[in-house]
Image: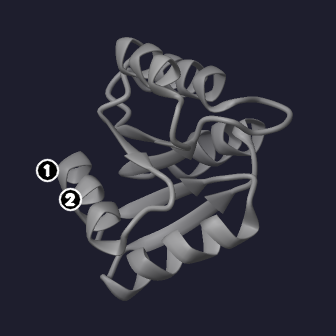
Amino acid sequence: MATILVVDDAAFMRMRMSKILSEAGYDVIQAGNGVEAVEQYRGQKPDAVLMDITMPEMDGLTALREIRAIDPQARVAMVTALGQQQVVLEAVKQGAKDFLVKPCEGERVLAAVSKLCA
């Protein structure tokens, strides 16, 4: 099964998404910020990434750019709070393949990951 990198500075969001994905049979790795996300991506080469936009140390857009520099084929979906449409548009321009709005329903998380891994 595919390996998914879940990136969010909120531990409860990482745990919630990881649980949804694990129960569906995915292998899950986690990162708490953009710096960790880039390190995990470089070391683990996950099949897809679900990445929060607003995080300390390195935000999701910067991490997206760095991951796409490592792997131009990287499959990343951005996870955003309501009201960040402008940031989502910027993320799509920079190569994000999809986006989810928090709080994410389990079916939406699985649909996004399925689309990323297809």
| Mark 1: amino acid | Ala
Q: Which numbered disc covers residue 118?
A: 1
Q: Position of residue 83 (x, y in %)?
A: 52, 32
Q: Is residue 114 left or right of residue 80?
A: left
Q: Residue furthest bottom?
A: 23
- Above or below: residue 32 compared with residue 96: below
Residue 65 sits in which quadrant? top right
Residue in the image at 55% along x and 44% along y: 81
Q: Position of residue 59 (x, y in %)?
A: 71, 30
Residue bearing mark 2? 114
Q: Is residue 57 left or right of residue 113?
A: right
Q: Is residue 47 left or right of residue 12?
A: left
Q: Residues within 10 Å of mark 1 (few under 14, many from 20)?
A: few
- Above or below: residue 9 compared with residue 11: above
Q: Residue furthest left?
A: 118
Q: Position of residue 70 (x, y in %)?
A: 52, 23
Quarter holding the N terminus? bottom left
Residue in the image at 69% along x and 36% along y: 54
| Mark 2: amino acid | Ser
Residue in the image at 30% along x and 82% along y: 24
